[in-house]
Image (cartoon, rainbow, N blue to C red):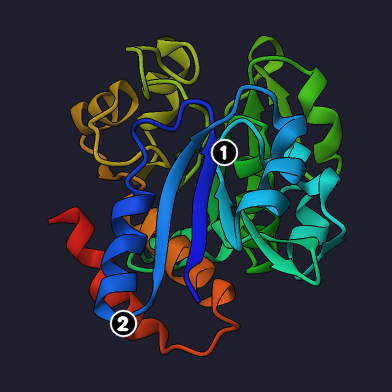
Amino acid sequence: MNKKFTIFGNPVKHSISPKMHGFAIDGLGLDASYSKTLLEDGNQIKEIFLKKFDGANVTVPHKEIAFKLCDEVRGVAKDIGAVNTLIKEDNKMIGYNTDASGFYESIKEFSDIKDILILGAGGTSKAISLYLKNKGFNITILNRSQKRLDSFSDFKTFSWDDFKPEKYDMIINTTSAGLSDNNYPAPKEILEDIFQNAKVAVDVIYNKNTPFLSLAKGSDLETKDGSDMLLFQGVKAFNLFYGEKFDEGEIEKFMRQAFN
């Protein structure tokens, strides 16, 4: 039976998820296809998903609205309040979040990291911050405005206006700044200040040397883009599409070809 998968987002043109999943589908000899679905109104996700697809990924800016539309949410996604993976069961939309565990896998290579500053307060930030906090890291959130920080009551939070920087080992950009523009995720002077004492800068944007990463390199920080996060969350999402019956190492081997 031909299975149909997609990624919902806006923008979605840049996504290499179809390529990643395509390599896994071909490598495992499966009868399936994976497409991109540009969606301006996130409220349409459920209707389109149940009508056309067996599984889907969700990217910015629809992860939180998809969470609200799900018939059931499982795993860490319940605490995060955002989903990036959808599966269809008995014509119901079931939501998962593989962003959090995928990101954690991608930063395991860095040692001596304890204090982390996360830039942004959207769905990706929520996923990463909760997961890392549960792994024992000290997490601070910095966002442009105070409004979105209300949902981060369990964390130390700052807006740009009231930010009092401390020493952070790792700075993570979860915003879309630098994706299709040359913007920084926070004022340049704030970034230059916190980079002085940091070790690592990580951007969830992939396959691009963003202004954020470029500035971090200029401050002699180790840097990493979001390619491995995308890979690892994709591996876990793909396995959820198929009832977790495949070996994740096997899926990863095929998906890595998308980055070559």
Q: Is residue 73 left or right of residue 15?
A: right
Q: Is residue 30 above or below residue 154?
A: below
Q: Amino acid at mark 2?
A: Leu
Residue that carries the numbered disc 2 in the rendered image = 28
Badge number at residue 68: none
Instruction: Tell me residue 10's x, y (percent).
Output: 53, 27
Mark 1, secondary structure of its residue? strand
Q: Amino acid at mark 1?
A: Ile
Instruction: Tell me residue 43's x, y (percent).
Output: 77, 31
User: In this orientation, which residue lies closer to the viewer: 151 or 196?
Assistant: 151
User: In this orientation, which residue lies closer to the viewer: 55 or 115?
Assistant: 55
Q: Residue 195: which quarter of the image? A: top left
From the image, state whether disc 2 or disc 1 is nearer to you.
2
Residue drawn where x is 69% and y is 24% of the image: 41
Mark 2, secondary structure of its residue? loop
Instruction: Residue 112: tell me if it is visible.
Output: no
Q: Is residue 17 above or below residue 252?
A: above
Residue that carries the numbered disc 1 in the rendered image = 118
**Label 2 CA crowd tier, 10 Å (few <14, some 14–19, many 20+):** few
Mark toward the start of the polypeptide (2 vs 1) = 2
Residue drawn where x is 35% and y is 78% of the image: 251
Q: Is residue 26 left or right of residue 127?
A: left
Q: Residue 194: which quarter of the image? A: top left
Q: Is residue 100 left or right of residue 170?
A: right
User: In this orientation, which residue lies closer to the viewer: 135 or 52?
Assistant: 52
Alpha carbon of mark 2 to alpha carbon of mark 1: how far?
Answer: 37 Å
Instruction: Residue 215: tell me if it is visible.
Output: yes
Residue drawn where x is 29% and y is 31% of the image: 213
